[in-house]
Amino acid sequence: MRKTTAFAGLGLAAALVLSGCATATEAEAPMDETDETVMIDTVNSDGSALRAQLTALLADHVYLAAAAIDQAIADGGDLTTADVQAAVAVLDENSVEVAALVGSAYPDAEQPFLDSWRSHIPFFVNYTLGKATGDEAAAEQAVADLNGYAVSFGQLINSVVPELPAEAVQGELEMHAVSLLAAIDANLAGDPAYFSLLKEAAGHMPMTATALAGGIAANLGIQ
């Protein structure tokens, strides 16, 4: 069971991530040339591609955020180590990729999205620090900050994609926070359940990706 040392301070920069989206190809009977039925390719459509990319990036977000936090824990909160800095850099690359994907649909929203997405990772770090040092007030404040972020992020997304209700986006972010915090708790405690809890946290991201991609597709009129 790993023992964590007191942290001098943690501050990780990060982004959002989505896991994979499965598709299936069904055998089709030959169509009569006179059949005027319009067939929609839901496997290779723009909407499907957006959902798949979001799913992959958001899933990566969960695992990369966990890896960065885990490395910071292992290094006693020393963010100057090469390993921690490398983990944080890759995590931030993921944030940039998520924002770029959103920007491919809404160029003016790319930077605001990136700024907002990056801002929520330090709250996870503050929670980790509070729990590791026995500062429950700091941990509780971090949870409050994450809840507040979920509200503001929902409003931001709704302002760009009206088809996505702010409350629905808020709910997705709240689930992201709850599931990842549970994994962090297990990690700090040296509980082997950490790995299954982390998988569960990443497993939630396809739902988030589906919601976001669905709203964007509806807004842009793509399949």
Image: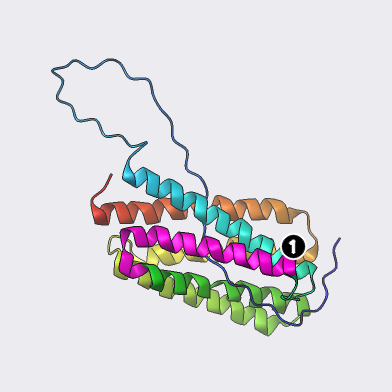
The residue singled out by tag 1 in the image is: 187
Name the residue rendered at 26%, 48% in the picture.
Answer: 222
Q: Is residue 72 left or right of residue 21?
A: right
Q: Position of residue 65 (x, y in %)?
A: 62, 63
Frontmost residue, 158 versus 80: 80
Q: Quadrant location of the C terminus? A: top left
Q: Amino acid at mark 1?
A: Asn
Tell me: residue 22, above or below residue 150. above
Q: Is residue 198 left or right of residue 108?
A: right
**Any part of residue 103 in sight:** yes
Residue furthest front as drawn? 82
Q: Could you tell me which residue is drawn at 32 percent across and 56 percent down?
A: 215
| The magenta stretch spans residue 51 | no
Res. 206 visible in picture? no
Q: Quadrant of residue 49?
A: top left
The boundaries of the magenta stretch are 82-109
Helix, strand or loop at mark 1: helix
Q: Main secondary structure of the magenta part?
A: helix
Q: Quadrant of the N terminus?
A: bottom right
Q: Residue at x 44, y 35 (%)?
A: 23
Residue 85: give x, y in percent of width and height.
68, 69
What is the image's colouring? Answer: rainbow
How many numbered marks have been drawn onto this rendered protein structure? 1
At x 51%, y 54%, the residue is 57
